[in-house]
Image: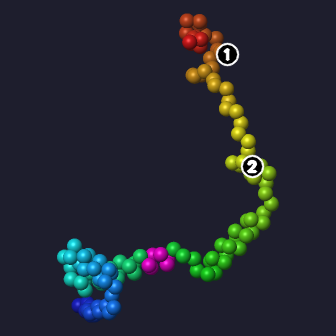
Amino acid sequence: MAICHTVTDIILHNLDPVLSDRLRRVAETRGWSLQRTALHLIETGLFAVEAEMAGRFEDHDSRALKEAIAALEGIPSDPGFALIGRADPQAAPAARPAGPDLSGLELLEEFRPNREG
């Protein structure tokens, strides 16, 4: 089964000179005709716009999200959670000697680490 593609001429009237120059430079860089370049850029632009549109909420989804946020904002604040990130800074804990605390173990003195320096 053969697939037939209809080729439509692309005619751009009143094209801005800067845009026209950009189109020509892309065509020259790629080694394409102006028609192929215009078609490629239109396709690429459409893909970008369609992807952008797909990431947006429909009106009913947007309303539902706003209602959910409003409901969450109406929940009374828990005093414990409300202080997260807002509590006064506390002093750092005292430095402990490096290594495990062996003071409670019965070790021969020759194996006890010297903690004095």
Nearest to the observer: residue 13 or residue 46? 13
Q: Which mark is drawn over residue 29?
A: none
Residue 107 lies, with reference to residue 96, above or below; the image says above
Residue 107 lies, with reference to residue 31, above or below; the image says above
Work out whether residue 23 can be spotted: no
Work out whether residue 20 can be spotted: yes
Crowding at dot 1, Cα within 10 Å, few <14 / some 14-19 / many 20+, comes out as few
**Which stretch did the figure color magenta?**
49-54
Residue 84 lies, with reference to residue 47, above or below; the image says above
Residue under label 1, please give it.
104
Residue under label 2, please give it.
83
Q: Quadrant of residue 30?
A: bottom left
Q: Residue at x 22, y 73 (%)?
A: 29
Question: Across the whole image, how many numbered discs are drawn on residues?
Answer: 2
Where residue 70 appears, as percent x and y from the top left, is 73, 70
Residue 75 forms part of the magenta stretch: no
Q: Residue at x 75, y 52 (%)?
A: 82
Q: Is residue 113 left or right of residue 63?
A: left
Residue that extends furthest to the left in the rendered view of this protein: 31
Nearest to the observer: residue 54 or residue 46? 46
Whether tag 1 and tag 2 are in contact, CB under 8 A, the answer is no
Residue 84 lies, with reference to residue 27, above or below; the image says above
Q: Amino acid at mark 2?
A: Leu
Q: Residue at x 44, y 79 (%)?
A: 50
Where residue 36 appears, as percent x and y from the top left, is 25, 83
Q: Earlier in the sequence, mark 1 or mark 2?
A: 2
Q: Quadrant of residue 16?
A: bottom left
Q: Amino acid at mark 1?
A: Gly
| Quadrant of image for the C terminus | top right
Secondary structure beneath dot 1 equals loop
Q: Quadrant of residue 12?
A: bottom left
Nearest to the observer: residue 30 or residue 107? 30
